[in-house]
Amino acid sequence: MKPVIVAVAITGSVPRKKDNPAVPITPAEQVESTKQAYEAGATLAHIHVRNDDETPSSDPQRFAAVYDGIRRHCPGMIVQFSTGGRGRDPSRRSSSLFLKPDMASLATGSVNFPSIVYKNPTALVEDLASKMMENGIKPEIEVFDLSHLHGARRLADRGLLDERPHVQFVMGIQNALPAQEHLLDMLPTEARLLFPACTWTAAGIGRHQAEVMGWALTRGADAVRTGLEDNIRISKERVANSNAELVQVVTEAIARHGRRVATPGEARQILGIP
């Protein structure tokens, strides 16, 4: 059976405790939530940090505390920092890359979100890509629009990205890529035309999480993503008790699709991370 990486986006920058009390905010809460998700089968943790008032933070000390805790309690787990811009000063989006996480997210173009424009101007994208390369960090290319794949190709042509990126298609955000199954016939094909050695995953937002995961598994995705950043609910009637509960839903889906959860070592081999 082909192994599949389970990525868990534990916090994000939007959900608050009032939305779901299980959203981990403090570094200690984030480490404990990640540990539970790891024990349930997650092998990649996507990390945002928050201030004490739950607003998004770029504080390197908070990133370091979460990173160190995951390394202690989750042997071999891949740690991926967010460089996302929602609620963060653009000049500080790279402020924690000196900590050298295994991976970091990299959006290669701007996109309209429901209430804001998620701005990723060329100079900022190139600066983030350069710092990732300098620190030996593998980027995960966040694709909200087809043009973002071609933005990644331009980075590679300039020597700012290697030829084996990990690509994530984000589906179900209003004004960006809709959650439509036929797009996962086209988008990975385009990614492989541009980067023949790339790996890929897809993230469904909110109520689209389970269906996008199923479409990705059917098409042989290298990874799937879950977590309270993207979806705070188990069902329309009930919020999730934890990130680990969402991971359990994923592991069951992986088994139904005739695949198995990758071990931490397998996950690193799939993504080419030492």
Image (cartoon, grey):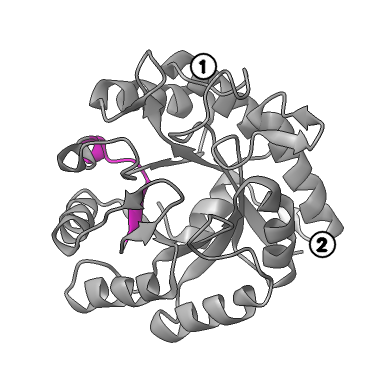
Task: Answer with left or right where residue 165 lies relative to residue 243.
Answer: left
Q: Residue furthest bottom?
A: 193
Residue where numbered disc 1 is placed: 29
Residue found 20% across the figure and 60% down from its top? 121
Which element type, helix, strand or loop, lies under badge 2?
loop
Instruction: Report the magenta residues as a range.
Output: 96-107
Q: Residue furthest right?
A: 256
Residue where numbered disc 2 is placed: 257
Residue 156 in view here: yes
Which element type, helix, strand or loop, lies under badge 1?
helix
Q: Residue 93 is drawn in which quadrant? A: top left
Q: Position of residue 129 (x, y in %)?
A: 22, 58
Mark 2 residue type? His
Residue 40 in view here: no
Quarter that holds the N terminus: bottom right
| Circle 1 crowding by C-alpha within 10 Å: few under 14, some 14–19, many from 20 | some
Task: Answer with left or right where residue 186 lies relative to residue 92.
Answer: right
Q: How many marks?
A: 2
- CA gap, disc 2 to disc 1? 32 Å
Nearer the observer, 140 or 73: 140
Residue 175: give its label. none
Tell me if residue 234 is in the magenta stretch: no
Q: Position of residue 128 (x, y in %)?
A: 21, 53
The mark nearer the N terminus, 2 or 1, is: 1
Q: Residue furthest front?
A: 115
Q: Position of residue 140 (x, y in %)?
A: 40, 57
Q: Is residue 151 above or below residue 256?
A: below
Q: Is residue 268 above or below residue 126?
A: above
| Circle 2 crowding by C-alpha within 10 Å: few under 14, some 14–19, many from 20 | some
Nearer the observer, 206 or 50: 206
